[in-house]
Image (cartoon, rainbow, N blue to C red):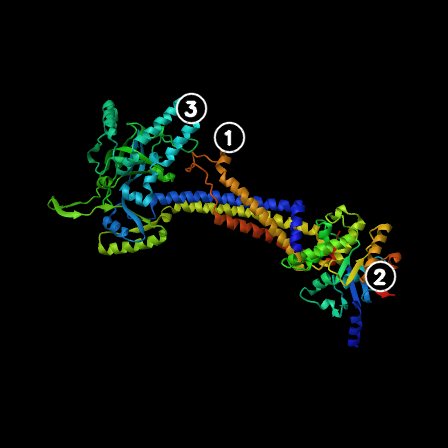
């Protein structure tokens, strides 16, 4: 009982323990903030990565693999699978407003693709995100600038009235747009000449629409809030939404055929949250790309007769993407899929080698780097924290020295050595609890308001530590992970007790008679 | 012989036999206690006189179980004190003896009342304390009131005068109703008048039957005791 009384009294009456508690507070807060923000990053990357690439992807080489319909059918019948869809992909060129860039072109069945990857949610100009942003902007500006107000109204109406989501889901071109393009081409013959020998909408089975990654267009810039202005979107004008796509068909044997070039129309843009994907990917209709890559089902050509042989060659796809049902991990799913692939391989000899890759494996380069970075930074700060606990040890040692005579008195009153040690361990515990809980509150305050703090810093001293134009996320992650916080606070408390351990043992070992004589 | 000795020691509440204590001062070996024999009967007040440095305080510490002798025994109520094991020596200091020091040695963070109560707290666990805290608090308050400190219960030591501090220290020593009060120069740090008041406190305790061993170098103070012994050359003589 006297231990508790003394711990409480010592805690209240002394400046030194306040410094020790402050050191614990700052260290705890520092580690929590760093690990929360870095962890938030990691989580955001993970969500984006999983969204962009489903749980498990079955992959083949550039030549693709046949019988993918059968594989999709078999996979969809598995109890672990929420959805599966085939994808064809190719590397190619996209020309947009006179700029040609190399991109990954993915042919998807939008309905099926949405089941494995939140495709619908990624469509930017129809996202709730965008709608909210434009509403916020309107409210923010109020009636101050009628011109801007009108511009926003007009922009909001444009995206509201055109059902771009629907068009993107079918790669259809909105009704008015075909004419506009024709008019446009008529007006400027040079534009037509630029496209050279590009065939028009003639060969666009499955829809001639294309959905661009939001960063594919070089004119797309993020504002200081990290938002894309609809004004810069290629969708805004008839000339800018014309896209020329060039792909290089690869035969099953790995040979390269003549490049195929098609003129297409951008019907929406998507934002996956991973810059690399948003910068380098466009979506087109599965059938369209499959045909363009000459991977669709066709009759075999008889080389001897020079005629069609009548024998059908099955169509090929590059990937089958699979989403797991709720509660099934990607590793579990991977195992099931691998088993299915083995079966498929025995049933059809011409399937070729296939690989089942989880989304973690697919994004290992990025996720692994961020994960390691988080670990490193947290570790470094933990090392810095050791200094604080050394400080606790020193402060406690000073307290023990200062209290030497009191320790002698307590021993004279019948306190055991363990009891005296207990006072200082309890003292360390109390300082650990007080310090780390204060640290937790401080960290929570900072993490939850980190975007506001950064905005304040930017406004008052012009220091912008977070630049949404550079980073791919608009806001600094501001989530506390309860498990991590518990571990950090627990460690801080334990470390405080450990910091007090040596001084506590020194106190217990004091000779009471000498302690009483201590001046 | 052994039985006879034991019997003799049972008659006394506190006794020491052939106590030796050495101190090392650099190269020099100080034989401070060289075979001290003392026996305190229940209710007796013994004053130990001696020059400073003669080993009076050391003797008191040994009697109270605070320090260990190099040789010899201390007997309390028929038990050999330094054979007590497993926290029983701590318990002996807590329950059976009460120390009063020349420099009071109050804990500066605690109020007068808490300084008295801490002696009682040391003797119980955190779980046992709530059961007796009310009673002990009352007892401590009564003690302080008897010593004229009724108005000073919530004062910290730095707000008390020397005499008041010593009275708090005496109350602390008495809170567990010890069998023997061990007072080390209880008036040594006080002016004559205040010292006299403390002496009166001890006298009234003694009248109520308290055994006291008091160490002092002041013969006038020692005169109040039933018996005076002098520590000289490491031995006691009457």
> Which numbered mark, 3 or 1, is in the foreground of this view?
3
- The image quadrant where one finds the N terminus of chain A is bottom right
Q: Chain of mark 2?
A: B
Instruction: Name which of mark 3 and mark 1 comes first in the sequence.
Output: 3
**Mark 1, residue position:** A459
**Residue at the image point whose x is 38% and y is 40% from the top:** A274
Residue A331, horizontal then vertical, whole percent: 36, 53
- Under circle 2, the secondary element is strand
On the image, numbered disc 3 is attached to which residue? A143
Q: Is residue B172 visible?
A: yes
Residue A511 visible to the viewer: no
Q: Nearer the viewer, mark 2 or mark 3?
A: 3
Left-right relation of B199 to A161 = right
- Pointer 3 indicates a residue of which chain? A
Report the residue marked by disc 2: B47
Quick check: A74 above or below A271? below
Residue A85 lies, in percent from the top left, at 28, 46
Chain ID of residue with mark 1: A
Question: Which residue is the extreme one toward the left?
Answer: A305
In this rendering, would A336 be left or right of A503?
Answer: left
Q: CA–CA distance between discs 3 and 1?
A: 24 Å
Gap in Å between the C-alphas at discs 2 and 3?
A: 97 Å
Between A3 and A208, the residue placed more toward the observer is A3
Camera-nearest residue between B128 and A485 = B128
In this rendering, the answer to whether B216 lies above or below A69 is below
Q: Nearer the viewer, mark 2 or mark 1?
A: 2
Q: Are marks 3 and 1 in contact (CB under 8 Å)?
A: no
Q: Are marks 2 and 1 in contact (CB under 8 Å)?
A: no
How many residues crowd around disc 3 within 10 Å: few (fewer than 14), some, or many (20 or more)? few
């Amino acid at each position: 009982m006297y231990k508790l009384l003394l711990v409480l009294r010592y805690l209240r009456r002394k400046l030194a323990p306040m410094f020790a508690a402050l050191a614990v507070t700052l260290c705890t807060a520092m580690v929590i903030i760093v690990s929360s923000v870095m962890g938030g990053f990691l989580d955001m990357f993970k969500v984006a990565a999983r969204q962009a690439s489903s749980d498990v992807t079955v992959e083949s080489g550039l030549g693709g693999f046949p019988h993918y319909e059968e594989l999709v059918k078999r996979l969809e019948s598995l109890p672990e699978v929420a959805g599966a869809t085939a994808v064809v992909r190719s590397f190619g060129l996209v020309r947009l407003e006179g700029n040609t860039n190399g991109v990954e072109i993915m042919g998807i069945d939008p309905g099926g693709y949405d089941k494995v990857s939140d495709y619908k949610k990624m469509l930017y100009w129809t996202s709730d995100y965008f709608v909210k942003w434009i509403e916020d902007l309107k409210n923010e500006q109020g009636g101050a600038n009628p011109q801007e107000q009108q511009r926003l109204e007009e922009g909001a109406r444009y995206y509201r009235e055109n059902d771009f989501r629907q068009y993107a889901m079918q790669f259809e071109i909105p009704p008015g747009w075909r004419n506009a393009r024709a008019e446009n081409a008529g007006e400027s013959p040079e534009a037509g000449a630029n496209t050279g020998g590009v065939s028009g909408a003639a060969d666009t089975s499955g829809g001639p629409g294309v959905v661009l990654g939001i960063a594919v267009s070089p004119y797309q810039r993020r504002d200081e809030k990290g938002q894309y202005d609809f004004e810069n979107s290629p969708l805004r004008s008839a000339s800018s939404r014309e896209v020329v796509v060039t792909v290089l068909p690869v035969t099953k044997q790995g040979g390269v055929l003549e490049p195929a070039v098609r003129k297409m129309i951008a019907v929406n843009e998507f934002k996956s949250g991973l810059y690399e994907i948003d910068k380098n990917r466009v979506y087109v209709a599965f059938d369209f790309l499959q045909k363009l890559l000459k991977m669709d089902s066709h009759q075999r050509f008889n080389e001897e007769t020079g005629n069609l042989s009548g024998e059908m060659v099955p169509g090929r796809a590059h990937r089958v993407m699979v989403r797991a049902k709720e509660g099934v991990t990607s590793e579990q799913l991977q195992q099931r899929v691998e088993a299915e692939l083995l079966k498929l391989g025995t049933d059809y000899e011409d399937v070729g080698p296939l690989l089942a890759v989880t989304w973690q494996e697919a994004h290992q380069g990025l996720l692994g780097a961020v994960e390691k970075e988080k670990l490193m930074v947290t570790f470094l700060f933990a090392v810095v924290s050791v200094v604080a606990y050394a400080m606790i040890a020193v402060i406690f040692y000073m307290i023990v020295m200062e209290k030497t005579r009191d320790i002698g008195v307590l021993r004279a009153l019948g306190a055991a050595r363990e009891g005296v040690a207990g006072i200082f361990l309890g003292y360390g515990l109390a300082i650990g609890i007080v310090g780390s809980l204060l640290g937790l509150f401080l960290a929570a305050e900072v993490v939850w308001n980190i975007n506001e703090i950064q905005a304040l810093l930017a406004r008052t001293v012009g220091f912008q530590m977070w630049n949404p134009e550079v980073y791919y996320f608009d806001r600094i992650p501001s989530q506390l992970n309860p498990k991590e916080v518990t571990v950090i606070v627990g460690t801080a408390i334990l470390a405080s007790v450990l910091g007090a351990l040596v001084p506590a043992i020194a106190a217990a070992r004091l000779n009471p008679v000498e302690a009483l004589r201590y001046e | 012989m052994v039985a006879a000795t034991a019997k003799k020691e049972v008659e006394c509440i506190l006794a020491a036999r052939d106590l030796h204590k050495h101190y090392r001062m650099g190269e020099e070996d100080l034989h401070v206690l060289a075979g001290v024999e003392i026996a305190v009967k229940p209710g007796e007040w013994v004053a130990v006189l001696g020059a400073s440095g003669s080993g009076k305080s050391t003797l008191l510490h040994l009697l109270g179980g605070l320090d260990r002798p190099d040789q010899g025994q201390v007997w309390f109520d028929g038990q050999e004190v330094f054979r007590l094991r497993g926290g029983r020596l701590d318990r002996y200091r807590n329950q059976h003896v009460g120390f009063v020091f020349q420099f009071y040695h109050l804990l500066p963070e605690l109020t007068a009342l808490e300084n008295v109560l801490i002696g009682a707290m040391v003797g119980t666990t955190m779980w046992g304390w709530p059961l007796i805290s009310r009673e002990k608090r009352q007892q401590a308050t009564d003690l302080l009131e008897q010593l004229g400190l009724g108005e000073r219960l919530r004062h910290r030591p730095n707000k008390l005068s020397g005499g008041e501090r010593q009275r708090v220290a005496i109350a602390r020593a008495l809170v567990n109703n010890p069998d023997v009060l061990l007072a080390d120069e209880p008036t040594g740090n006080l002016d004559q008048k205040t010292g006299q008041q403390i002496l009166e406190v001890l006298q009234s305790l003694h009248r109520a039957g308290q055994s006291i061993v008091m160490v002092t170098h002041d013969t006038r103070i020692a005169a109040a005791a039933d018996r005076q012994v002098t520590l000289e050359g490491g031995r006691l003589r009457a």
